[in-house]
Image (cartoon, rainbow, N blue to C red):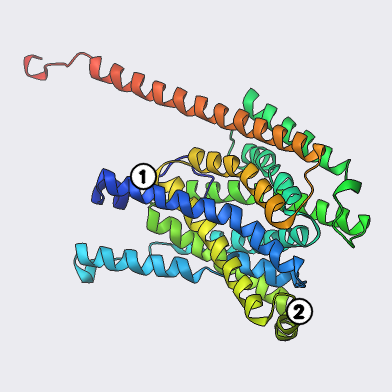
Amino acid sequence: MEGREELASPIVATKVSPSAKKALLILNCILLSLGNCGGPLSMRLYFLHGGNRVWLSAFLETGGWPFILIVLLVLYFCRRCSTSPTSTTVVFMRPRLFFAAAVIGALTGLDDFLYACGVSRLPVSTTSLIIASQLGFTAFFAFLLVKQKFTPYSINAVMLLTIGAAVLALHTSSDLPNGESRAEYLKGFFMTVAAAALYGLVLPMVEMTYNKAKQAITYTLVLEIQMVICLFATIVCTTGMIIDNDFKAIPREAKEYELGETKYYAVLCINAIFWQSFFLGAIGVVFCASSLLSGIIIAVLLPVTEVLAVVFYKEHFQAEKGIALVLSLWGFTSYFYGEYKVMKTKDIERESLHDRSVDLPQINYSSV
């Protein structure tokens, strides 16, 4: 998803006016913003008031995948109206791509579990800062899998994000939630780091899948890939829920929930909606604009999530978190500025190549 630099959509580029494309981009930015801030906060809300089913929380991160199916159905009927019904393609994904997406989905399910473990033990302001280190892992695995070159800017970003995570790790005593031991806190810390590392592997795998797809990458195909990833991640989490007896525990937990049984189910539904908003928004922003814009939005929203966690959950914001936040934002800025420079250089080279091809002398073969 975010691994692509930029995708060109026949739907957006040729069938939608510039004003409609702008409106679609704004809508996706709103979805991404709501999901990016609301997802962690709603998940933490579940744990703060008596919830303790980690596999259930992991399930909710991708359990809203039927929303993508609804979008795909809308796109199908749009294609059906604009072309002959008999020639309208129902599914664009080929078997090779399906199996690749299924493997990525299984890894995503494991990543969801690790992240939920972290959120269950750590304040939102802490998990958000740790997850920021994902950018460093993404750069490393992208170098290994898709041969993405390191630049001085990306190396600087990795170092800054690593230092930021280390600052948090060295000052855990002042960040312990009420009633939680240092051992549980450290367990949550390292599981969140593992979640960041695993998702840092998933993103280059998605990009490698796109590169080896051997078919045109359209918005509809991207949605199909994302739906399969979410589906298999949900299957992994559902299996975990069965093994952990979550389905038997949910009714009992709902009755004992501090906010009441009705609000318990409301929190679960809102959680699923926020996370699916994040996925749909990220896909839309990457497709309508670029992954650079998607990354910038997520980076800009990091301090917003921090502030919301302090306001709503009364979390402590110590000096260490402030230092880690500054280092994270500095790392994000360094990375995305480097990506911007690379993209700008490629555009200049492309224009230069085009100009040279135009200036080549034309040979008059009739006179030869």
Q: Quadrant of the C terminus?
A: top left
Indicate which disc residue 8 carries: 1
Report how far apart the C-alphas of labels 1 and 2 lie in the structure. Answer: 43 Å
Question: Dot 1, how many residues are within 10 Å of its Cα: few (below 14), some (14-19), or many (20+)?
Answer: some
* 249 relative to 207, above or below: below
Q: Is residue 53 left or right of residue 96?
A: right
Residue 79 in sight in this render = yes
Residue 111 locus on image (x, y percent): 69, 58
For mark 2, what is the residue?
Answer: 243
Residue depicted at 72% across the width and 62% down the height: 116
Hey, what amino acid is under mark 1?
Ala
Q: Nearer the viewer, residue 192 or 84?
A: 192
Residue depicted at 60% across the width and 57% down the height: 38
Q: Is residue 16 left or right of residue 136?
A: left
Hey, what amino acid is under mark 2?
Ile
Indicate which disc residue 269 carries: none
Question: The residue tagged with tag 1: helix, strand or loop?
Answer: loop
Question: The residue tagged with tag 2: helix, strand or loop?
Answer: helix
